[in-house]
Image: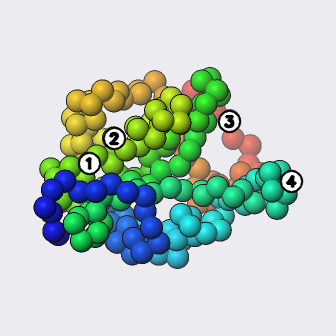
Amino acid sequence: MTLTGPPTIRPARPEDVPAVVAMVHELAEYERAPDQCHLTEEQLTAALFGTAPARDAAPDAPNGSGRDPAPALYGHVAVDADDRPLGFALWFLNFSTWAGVHGIHLEDLYVRPAARGTGAGRLLATLAAICVERGYRRLEWSMIDWNPAAGFYAAIGARQISEWVPYRLSGDALADLAAQARGGPHTSVRPSG
């Protein structure tokens, strides 16, 4: 790491992908879930710069191709004086039906331990600036409940939204629900309580 000043924050480039994937795996290790992280360089390259599965979800795309020309995922990196990534932010657009405008969902923010305290955390400020410049009203993210960054987030004015509870479908539950859309068998589930 060569720091002669604060890191530079810039959009991710294809040559950053190996370092970003390595840092995603470092983050999974930090969050005590390395066995759950399966991201490959090919997957991240496709999501950031190529044809990603999420981009196939636009049957009425303006170009008539059935593909959305916008990236499924965006990325920014904090780099040292030698242009080596020290940290990253991966994010995508969401949309608030109540506000009627887009926002940013920050999927991951990670700064390598040796680069913490150097200004690499300005990645978050960069996303806030994108929101303001584009008229977005929200920058949202989730974090593991024991992450010490909670104090930092509170200090910059972020608030925990405790009245909204995240849900996730994955694995067999996701496949079972998808089968219902195709007219397949399903189990009647009654809410508890």
Query: Compared with residue 98, is residue 61 higher up or lower down, i.e. above or below?
Result: below
| Residue underneath mark 2 | 125
Location of the C terminus by quadrant is top right
Q: Earlier in the sequence, mark 2 or mark 3?
A: 2
Tell me whether circle 4 and circle 2 mark residues in contact (CB < 8 Å).
no
Q: In the drawing, what numbered circle is on residue 190? A: 3
Q: From the viewer's side, name the closer residue of 107 and 73.
A: 73
| Label 4: few (<14), some (14–19) or many (≥20) C-alpha neighbours in 10 Å | few
Residue 183 circle label: 4
Q: Residue at x 71, y 51 (%)?
A: 177
Q: Which residue is mark 1?
A: 121
What's the amino acid at mark 2? Ala
Q: Secondary structure at mark 2?
A: helix
- Quarter of the figure that contains the N terminus: bottom left
Label 2 with label 1: CB-CB less than 8 Å: yes
Name the side, left or right, on which 87 lies relative to 62: left
Marks 4 and 1, how far apart at CA? 48 Å
* Type of amino acid under label 3: Arg
Q: Position of residue 40 (x, y in %)?
A: 47, 74
In terms of sequence position, does the residue under pointer 3 or pointer 4 come before the other?
4
Q: Nearer the viewer, mark 2 or mark 3?
A: 2
Q: Amino acid at mark 1?
A: Gly
Which mark is in front, 4 or 2?
Answer: 2
At label 4, which amino acid type do we have?
Gly
- Disc 2 crowd rating (10 Å Cα; few below 14, some 14-19, many 20+) is few
Residue drawn at x 46%, y 24% as measured from the top left = 163
